[in-house]
Amino acid sequence: MKLRRLAALALCGVMALSALPAGALAARREKMNADDMDIPAILEDTQAGGTVNVYHWWTAGGEKDAIESVVDGFKDVYGKIKAKSNAIPGGAGGAMVMKVKVLQQAGKSPETFQAHPGQEIEPYLNSDLLLSLDQVWEYADLSARALPGIETLCTASDGSKYIVPIGIHKTNVIFYNIHVFEKYGVAIPDHENITWDEFFSICDQLAAAMPDGEYPLDLGDRKGWPACQVFEDIMLGTDPQIYEDFINGNYSVEDVTAVLSTYARMMDYVAPDHSSRDWYEASGQVVAGTYAMQIMGAWMQPLLTSMGQVYGEDYGVFTFPGTDGWFGMCIDGFVVSNDSADVGSGVRWAYNVSTPEVQAAFSALKESISPYSDTPDDTYCALTLKFKNELTAEGTKVYPSFTHGTALPWSASTSLQTQIQEFATSTDHDAAYFANKIVNILKEAGVKGAWNLVD
């Protein structure tokens, strides 16, 4: 699927993941309707006061600096509004969904919070908790500025847009410590698009050379989602058709068993206590040389930068085996509650994250790809520019992440994270047993999509 064909993908079969109890509605404030608001006037009122509570999950090194740059950029324009940055650790959106639900039930909806476009925001829509940002998109000319396909992914099931994207990361990446390879005499391939045979050969060589207590790979999956992300990478790397069928609800126990069988083989090279660490803690051990490689999205870049690591000198990247020519897409953005204490300030925040000034500052620190074509290439470091060029290349095919909220209902995604982490930590890695459990998750969630990735 070429990038320009991303716009042809459709989200369908949307289901509510969890509805608010009826009694909770009484505690919440009156909901605002964007059609009754003069959004341009709100955005142009730079002397307005108020407070914007911003909830996000960026806590690792480099990420914190990036979100603080957005806060600073907001203050530069709306200096009389108090911007409060509230970090909710967890990643992949799962912890955020639960936190926002609790806040909204208590009548304390955040003005704005981080989310992924696609299925992740549908529970909020089903409970009528989000403000339409169609006017923001129009005012900021986002349809013209956004990279091809982004607008479609940000368009909800009712045809409106409730999210303003702030950054894009590639998910199908393996980071490796160059010094570990050199220390143990393992040759680094002269190409990044390694095959499965090359990957397992590298793992074998490292496993044979590394002493007890050091391992070729780590997951850092204490929160569960990193193990699930590896699962989706293996699935795409096994057969893109399996991936397409999976997110469309055309599940097959045999196909999932094949994916998990490869996963089981990979686990032979992973540190056995992998689930005792968060992903960023595992990254620190990759830098220290305890683990040679880590399968992680490109948001690992700013963390490595914050630890003084230099791409091409201290670390390198491989494309996940079998995914050559594919770009696993994770899009971050912000949505606005329609019942917060200061809806107008939430709207201003959502708009401001898309401005060229904020995009340049954020993208440089987050080392993420800007969703907007008017962000200059000199914003990016070498590795981010490489990923950006991959994303926009004529022959690149894009697949939406189900770990990160876009391609599967939230209930299915979070259940998958639990089951796949359980598989990864099990002693026997029974692929057929867990394949049946995974298929049942999709069945119970009623997954029914219309994604077209392969044709």
Image (cartoon, rainbow, N blue to C red):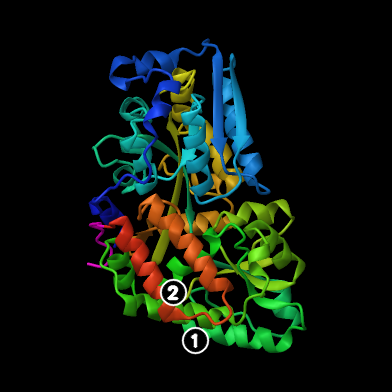
Question: Position of 18 compared to 300: left or right?
Answer: left
Q: Where's residue 205, x and y in %?
A: 65, 88
Q: In what element is the residue under mark 2? A: helix
The picture places residue 303, in percent across and down from the top left corner, at 66, 53
In the image, which is nearer the foreground, mark 1 or mark 2? 2
Q: 438 left or right of 103?
A: left
Q: Amino acid at mark 1?
A: Asp
Q: Which residues are magenta?
A: 448-455
Residue 321 is left or right of residue 271, and the answer is: left
**Residue identified by numbered label 2:** 434
79 to 411, vertically: above or below: above
- Cα gap from disc 1 to disc 2, whole angstroms: 25 Å
**Residue in view at x 66 percent, y 47 percent:** 62
Q: Is 1 rendered above or below residue 178?
A: above
The answer to whether residue 312 is visible is no
User: Which label number is shown at residue 197?
Assistant: 1
Disc nearer the start of the sequence (1/2): 1
Residues at badges 1 and 2 in contact (C-beta under 8 Å)?
no
Q: Which quarter of the figure is the C terminus placed in?
A: bottom left
